[in-house]
Amino acid sequence: MYQLDFPWLLLILPAPLIVWWLLPPHRETSASIRLPFFNEVARAAGVEPTEGSVVPKRSWMQVAVDLIAWCLIVLALARPQYVEPPVVKTEPQRDILLALDLSQSMDTRDFAAPDGTSKARVEAVRTVVSDFVSRRPGDRLGLIAFGDAPYPLAPFTMDHALVKNLVESLLPGIAGPRTAMGDSLGLAIRMFEKTTVPQKVLILLTDGNDTASKMPPLKAAGIAKSKQIVIHTVGIGDPAATGEDKLDTASLEKIATDTGGRYFFGGDQSQLQEIYDELDRITPEDQKQLSWRPRTELFFWPLGGAIATMLAWYGLTGLYSLVRRRLPA
């Protein structure tokens, strides 16, 4: 659609008429001598009398040209625009960070698959988390892998295909044999500091207890709580194991509870799938839509028309007068 950005400027269209009416041409009376035989004196002197002051009248064509030019100038001042159809942009209101344990114990083949076979824990995690990523088209996702230390594999991004490919290529032990759960929480906090969305969610998955962190997991959870980061924890290890392989369910439960999240335990691939289904349900998509209408400025068209009209009229009349003066009488 077309519109005027300053339509009130059209009120100045009658301004020339108002000026002509309120400010008539200046007339001045001067002293003179009236000679009843002026024509005889002029003939005797050989002089052709002329008018002392000549004010040529405007032709109707000149009035029309000036009127058209004035209207075009006022139209240009009113700033005509072409308003294009609305453009809608959707912005996510939640960032989800996936932190996955890739210690050597993730290679343990004790996870029952739906077909009854046993597979490595990391294989089940790849399948379930990849499916979770596919169902979050409206959220920005990030990815952390941790073992001896945490490593940011993907910053927060809408490129879910990239995150999915990274998840499907994860291998146990590539980050080291141990588990740095507390440090991974610290890295997650630093990554969330660079985001401006109102909702920040961390989903932490591990199969053991913290054996390599410099920052205690509970202290990191306290910092996350102060920064309004919700942490959901998922345990898939063996709570009855000993040493490094024992799943620290107490810490995982407290981390989730203190930050407003939930703790889940998955003993096989079906349970793990149900956990991520539940996480998908309790974190529904939250998006903000921004709409604006692009505008194309058109003021230069009436302005150019006014200039072209004036140049054409006065150029042609000037050329006509010049030709008339040069033609022989």
Image (cartoon, rainbow, N blue to C red):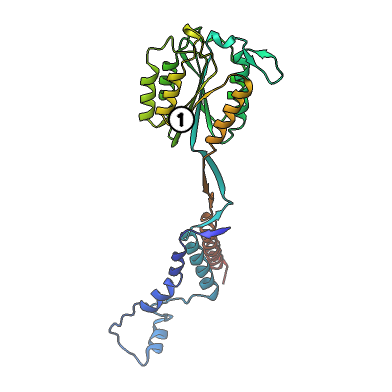
Left or right relative to 29: residue 328: right
**Residue 205 placed where, x, y %?**
52, 20
Number of marks in picture: 1
101 in relation to 326, above or below: above
Relative to residue 56, is residue 289 depicted above or below?
Answer: above
Q: Which residue is mark 1?
A: 261
Horizontal relation, residue 36 to residue 74: left or right: left
Q: Quadrant of the C terminus?
A: bottom right
Observer-nearest residue: 11 or 83?
A: 83
Q: Residues within 10 Å of mark 1 (few under 14, many from 20)?
A: some
Tell whether 291 sits left or right of 191: right
Residue type indicated by callout 1: Gly
Residue at 37 percent across and 15 percent down: it is: 215
Give the residue at the far front of this rendering: 240
Question: Residue at image x 52%, y 48%?
Answer: 291
Regarding residue 83, the answer to whether it shows in the image is yes
